[in-house]
Each structure stands twice: as structure tokens, then as C-alpha cells.
Image: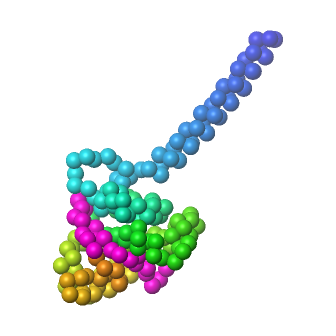
Amino acid sequence: MSFLVFLTIMGCKNDNKANIEDSNSTASENVESKMQGQAFIKDDESKPNVLQVALGSPDHSTLVTAVQAADLENALVNAGPLMVFAPTNEAFAALPQGTVENLLKPENKDALANILKYHVTPGNYSKDFLKKFKKLGQANNQDVMIEVQGDDVFVGGAKIVASVPAGNGIVHVIDKVLLPANQ
């Protein structure tokens, strides 16, 4: 009889241990599933892609935070070519107070993704080549207007202040956040 009690107690302990292990592995799987895809592959030999360019820039930490909140990392590492119009931290800071914080909330993920996709277009065009365009079709299926003033190129009213070639396209640094008409 005491042997049966012992087996019952040991069986209960093993069930609890299995439940704890299951819950720990589920938590690990959730973290790992969020960090899957091309964006999370380590590669020290290739030319940095557009996401890696942004990650390496201290002037684009707000943009990187927004890309992560919208789960768009993997889209920015595709073969491309991609042109990313990358607003600086100062550009985000110029938005009305509370705008960025509000967009980063999980319930606003779709609106944030729409805004970020408005900053991306297929192609790999230099600032000078962009002078030949009147508008570009963006990744959110809306057009953005191109304007030339002397040597300056403006995309949706934002001035291109620098350009950084990337392995899968080009990053044009801009001084304003582009806001699509349909948000």
C-alpha cells in the first residue's frame, strides 16, 4: 500500500515538473517566433541591408523602434532593391507631442505600418536620378510627390539630406516624417 502512495506522489511531482517545463518552453518559443526570418540572420561579410544601415545609425533609433513595433524588420531585408526614406530622430521629435508614443501602442500597429510603408518604394535610385520623377509609388499603395529645388530633392515635402547605399537598395535620410493621406 505504501508503495502505491509513493508512486502516486511521484506521479504528481512529475506532472507539475512537466507543466512548468511546458510553460517555460512556450515562453521561449514566443520570444523565438518573434525573432525569426531574414532580419535576424547574423552576417558579418555582406554589405549592410537597409535595416542594418538604420540599426547602425544613432540618428535613426526612433525609426528602428517604430519598425520593430510594426514587425516590419523582415520586409526591409528582402532582396529588393528598396529605397527607404528614413526620417531622423529630430524629424520624429518635430511631430505633435505624443504622436510617436501613440503610434507605438500595439493597438495602433496597422496605422504605424501604413506610415512606415509610405517611406519605402521599390528601386535603388540616387538623389540625382530621383530628379527625373514627379512621383513615386510607395509600398502602402499610395503615391508620394517628388519636388526639385536647385540641387535639393524633396520627397513628400521632406528634404533628402544624405544617402547611404545598402546591400539591397539605398537609404535616403530625410528631415521630416512622411504622413500618407490615407492613414
* Quadrant in which residue 89 is drawn: bottom left
> Can residue 23 be seen in this snapshot?
yes
Q: Residue 5 location, x and y as percent?
A: 78, 16
Q: Quadrant of the N terminus?
A: top right
| Left or right of 137, for residue 101 | right
Residue found at x 56% / y 43%: 27
| Left or right of 35, for residue 122 | left
Q: Residue 7 location, x and y as percent?
A: 73, 17
Asked if residue 170 lies in the magenta stretch, the reply is: yes
> Can residue 64 be seen in this snapshot?
no
* Quadrant in which residue 88 is drawn: bottom left
Asked if residue 163 lies in the magenta stretch, the reply is: yes
Q: How is the image coloured?
A: rainbow
Q: Residue 85 location, x and y as percent?
A: 33, 72
Q: Which residues are magenta?
A: 161-183
Task: Please determine whether, in this image, residue 76 is positioned above or below residue 122.
Answer: above
Residue found at x 80% / y 11%: 2
In front of the other: 153 or 5: 153
Task: Please determine whether, in this image, residue 41 is positioned above or below residue 158.
Answer: above
